[in-house]
């Protein structure tokens, strides 16, 4: 056995290069794991089926958004958590997290690489699913009926694209939470419990807290629009209403503060990644 | 029993020398090189359970140092502490080796790798983190080149161990810590793993390993550290230890150096 020659350079790769390597590893993991492929295809099929069965596709873009919003409030968090909750736990269980700690890669670079890599797969699923819905609308759309008939001129694919971007933003936020759960848990049993808990908190808990805060007077009337940004789900819902539904309707009561909602989602995203980094450093 | 390690702080600084037969037969060879990693009076506890107390050891380059002791005595804990993967609750651990891109390589007990990737792809990922561009050389080095394109989940236990060792060598770290590198392997593969460790030491690498295979440790290790009852029972070259205990083999030395019943698991921390 001889010492490998010319296999090593003296300078370690830059942080960006290391992130890119981790991103590539995560991306290939998603592509090669049948579960994620099935999950993506299933999500697309469900979204397409929901859009078609609700009659939204024949009504136009905005009716489809209205029909899909509530199901996506449930489906997107489930999908995002499924994509992220074992991302770091798996490495920890195999001992690869310990191995990685002997390499010159910072925890923040590792976590960011994992997040971005998983995000690529998640975004592909979300964008492709909603693109299929948009294509279905193009072919199935008939004359608008009912309430939206008077606003047919504002039923634009641009609004649907806006809805798609907001849904992607929401998915990325929940993915960051899932990555944080994955980093904190470190064990299979713990991560399942924490992931379910996180889902319940995001889907129900925070909204209930807002309702309680409003009912008990802790949240005043004037601050409600900003306070709902505290919940990622409410922030997403508020953004969709403000940016898509009310825009199409042309009028209506303000349902959320757009800056506060965007800020809320960003805080959840960045905060979760910080938690994941600190947990990975342990 | 807890004893201090036989460190030689006044030894002159010299270049790392390949392992020689003399170094295995005479612990006076300890003075040849300065320690790469030094643990100074470290304690280690998991909550209220004390595992190690007042342990001092020195790991030197170009040598195979074996941590030996009964199950649960703290071999893995000490190895992880020396590898910088766990912080002692008291005392200090210092690394005095060269400033390299990866100072310490590590093979965990029962190594596993992310499924869906081949052996070569796995090494490519790790190698890319230190700027290496020829991970295939690492596979060749441990004799695993033929399995380069096999997915890690299809590797045998021995192949996985070898892949783990190849991973541990990436970046040519001055210290490589191998936690039971031959665990669960057949005799032939076990021998091969120790041969790899010997060849690593011959290139100047400090190899720190844990093992229960006293026969192979006796044949390959330059330094043996007996752990017992939370501390270092004794340490030295296999031959020096055998002389000290007037034993014919490392196994006999082990029996005489360690206190208590070797057929019973000792649990530390439960008694007052």
Image (spheres, coloured by chain):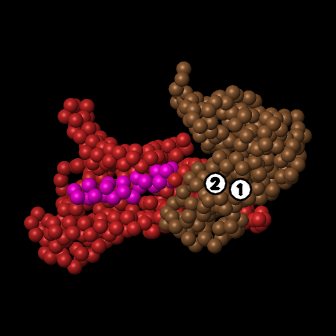
Chain colours: A red, B brown
Task: Give the secondary structure at mark 1.
Answer: helix
x, y percent for residue A66: 20, 61
Check residue A164 for magenta coloring: no
User: How far from the left and from the top, in percent, is residue B14?
Assistant: 89, 46
User: What x and y, as percent, mark residue A177?
Assistant: 40, 49
Q: Which residues are magenta?
A: A69-93
Tell me where residue B209 appears, x and y as whole percent: 69, 48
Relative to the observer, which residue lies in front, B259 or B156?
Answer: B259
Residue at image mark 2: B182
Q: Report in which chain the residue with disc 1 lies.
A: B
- The front one of A181 and B30 is B30
* A111 relative position to B54: left or right: left
Tell which subunit mark 2 falls on.
Answer: B
In primary-sequence order, the first of circles 2 and 1 is: 2
What residue did someone put label 1 on? B194
Identify whether A264 is placed above or below A7.
Answer: above
């Amino acid at each position: 056995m001889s010492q490998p020659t010319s296999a090593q350079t003296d300078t370690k790769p830059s942080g960006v290069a290391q992130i890119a390597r981790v991103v590539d590893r995560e991306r290939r993991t998603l592509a090669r794991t049948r579960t994620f492929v099935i999950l993506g295809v299933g999500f697309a099929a469900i979204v397409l089926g929901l859009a078609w069965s609700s009659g939204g596709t024949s009504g136009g873009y905005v009716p489809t958004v209205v029909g899909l919003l509530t199901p996506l409030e449930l489906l997107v968090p489930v999908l995002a958590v499924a994509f992220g909750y074992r991302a770091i736990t798996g490495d920890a269980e195999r001992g690869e997290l310990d191995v990685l700690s002997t390499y010159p890669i910072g925890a923040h670079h590792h976590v960011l690489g994992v997040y971005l890599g998983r995000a690529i797969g998640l975004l592909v699923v979300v964008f492709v699913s909603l693109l299929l819905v948009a294509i279905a609308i193009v072919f199935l759309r008939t004359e608008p009926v009912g309430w939206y008939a008077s606003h047919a001129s504002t039923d634009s694919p641009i609004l649907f694209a806006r809805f798609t971007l907001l849904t992607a933003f929401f998915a990325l936020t929940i993915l960051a939470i899932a990555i944080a759960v994955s980093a904190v848990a470190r064990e299979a049993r713990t991560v399942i419990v924490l992931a379910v808990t996180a889902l319940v908190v995001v889907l129900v808990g925070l909204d209930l807290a807002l309702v309680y805060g409003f009912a008990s007077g802790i949240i005043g009337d004037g601050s409600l629009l900003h306070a709902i940004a505290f919940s990622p789900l409410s922030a997403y819902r508020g953004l969709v209403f403000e940016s898509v539904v009310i825009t199409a309707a042309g009028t209506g009561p303000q349902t959320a503060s757009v800056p506060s909602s965007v800020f809320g989602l960003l805080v959840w995203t960045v905060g979760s990644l910080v938690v994941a980094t600190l947990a990975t450093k342990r | 029993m807890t004893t201090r390690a036989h460190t030689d702080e006044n030894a002159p600084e010299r270049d790392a020398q390949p392992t020689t037969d003399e170094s295995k037969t005479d612990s006076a060879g300890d003075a040849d090189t300065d320690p790469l990693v030094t643990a100074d009076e470290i304690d280690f506890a998991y909550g209220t359970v004390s595992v190690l107390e007042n342990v001092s050891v020195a790991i030197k380059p170009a040598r195979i140092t074996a941590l030996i002791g009964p199950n649960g005595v703290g071999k893995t804990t000490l190895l992880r502490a020396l590898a910088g993967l766990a912080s002692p609750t008291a005392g200090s651990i210092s690394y005095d080796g060269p400033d390299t891109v990866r100072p310490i390589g590590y093979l965990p007990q029962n190594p596993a790798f992310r499924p869906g990737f081949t052996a070569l792809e796995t090494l490519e990922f790790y190698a890319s983190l230190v700027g290496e561009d020829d991970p295939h050389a690492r596979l060749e080095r441990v004799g695993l080149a033929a399995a380069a394109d096999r997915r890690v989940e299809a590797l045998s236990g021995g192949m996985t161990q070898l892949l783990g060792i190849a991973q541990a060598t990436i970046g040519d770290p001055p210290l490589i810590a191998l936690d039971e590198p031959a665990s669960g392997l057949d005799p032939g593969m076990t021998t091969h793993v120790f041969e790899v460790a010997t060849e690593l030491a011959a290139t100047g690498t400090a190899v720190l390993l844990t093992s229960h295979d006293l026969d192979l440790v006796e044949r390959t290790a330059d330094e043996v550290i007996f752990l017992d009852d939370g501390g270092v029972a004794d340490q030295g070259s296999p031959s020096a230890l055998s002389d000290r205990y007037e034993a014919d083999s490392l196994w006999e030395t082990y029996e005489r150096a360690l206190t208590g019943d070797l057929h019973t698991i000792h649990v530390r921390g439960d008694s007052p």
